[in-house]
Structure formats: C-alpha cells, structure tokens
Image: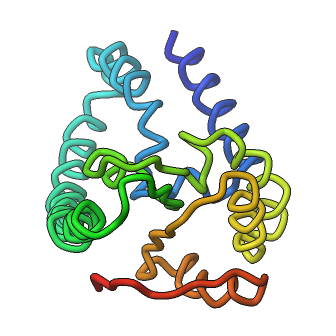
Amino acid sequence: IVKACAAYMVCLLVAVYCQLPDALSWNLFRYAVVVVPMLVYATARVAGSAKAKPLLPLSLAYSLFFALAVSIPAYRAECRYYAGSLHATAAWCNENLPPDSRILVQDVGYISFATRFRIIDAVGLKTPEAIELNRRYTLHSAGFDRAEAISSLAHQTHPTHLIAATERSEIKHLAQQLQALGWHVELLKSFG
C-alpha cells in the first residue's frame, strides 16, 4: 500500500508539473496539500517498522520548524492583507459602485464573498470562459501575455470595473498593458 501511495503521488505531481510547472508552488504550496492524507497514511503504516522510527522525530522537528518559521508568519501576513487592502476594497466597492456593476478580478475569493456584485474571474475558477483564454495566452507565454487573456475575457463578459492586486508581480503592470491594448483604465481607488 505504501508503494501504491508513493507511485500515485509521484504520478500526480509529475502530471501537474507537466501541465503547469509552477502551480504546485502557488499560494505557499497549498495545492500540493492533496498528497498529505496519503503521506499520513503511509507514515502510519510504516510507523511500527524499525526503518521508520528515526524518521518520525525528524518529521516532527521539520513540521515544527516549518510552522514556526514559515507558516505562522505567512498566515499573519495573509490576515493583515485580507483585513487591510481586500476588506477596504470590498467596502469601497459596496459603497461607491453602481448596483449593476460587473467586476473583473484576478482573485475572486474574498471579493466575491464580501461584495454583492457580478464577479468575473480572470483565472477561470468561477468564470469558465477564462480557462481557454488562459491556456491560449497566459500558459504559453509564461504569463507575459496575461493582459491579452484578460482583454479577450473582457470583450466577452463586458465588465464595468477591474480589481487588480498590483502588489503581485504578475499583475503589477496590468493597467498599462490593458491601455496598450486599447482599453480605458482609470484608477478609482488604491488600497496599497
């Protein structure tokens, strides 16, 4: 069973890497978490063996180090981000945008939760039209043609507003890129 779990995890991770090489590292490797139940199961299966016993304290030490050095600081930074910029953005939208606004967003999670507007997801998790556009433009250009994908999606879905988290390097120049593609982009509000 342990060998079957290991073979499955290797096949899964290789398949994901072949389709989208950097996907496993996104959001602090949270998308690779699907293998954790198999790792726990495999570890439990071999925990009684003499070969596994030295690995358990090592695993525990690594987990504690990772939690203290990486996970907890990252969690606190994310809390500040959501409590600050995104919360302020959502509140501003709710107070200032017309009720029939359609907002194009590259990360729809919090904004779709905290606002009442029609949300268009530039990534494609909630707006399936974006998936093919991202495959056509973003994937093959390693992200350099992301504005092309967003522009095509905007032509299809007719958003009235755009929320761009410009602290993310891949979105930093999105407004200028969209303007170069003929869009009118006007800054209404910035929250850091």
Residue 151 at x, y percent in the picture: 73, 68
Query: Which residue lies at the image location 25% right of the left edge and 46% below the top edge?
Result: 58
Horizontal side of residue 53 vs 34, given as left or right: left
Residue 73 or 77: which is nearer the viewer? Answer: 77
Residue 8 or 50: which is nearer the viewer? Answer: 8
Colouring: rainbow
Query: Which residue lies at the image location 54% right of the left edge and 19% below the top edge?
Result: 5
Task: Give the mark count.
Answer: 0
Horizontal side of residue 39 vs 72, given as left or right: right
Query: Which residue lies at the image location 27% right of the left edge and 62% below the top edge?
Result: 90
Q: Is residue 166 above or below residue 4?
A: below
Residue 74 at x, y percent in the picture: 24, 65
Q: Is residue 129 above or below residue 27?
A: above
Query: Which residue lies at the image location 34% right of the left edge and 55% below the top edge?
Result: 111
Residue 185 or 10: which is nearer the viewer? Answer: 185
Residue 8 at x, y percent in the picture: 62, 23
Horizontal side of residue 71 vs 42, given as left or right: left
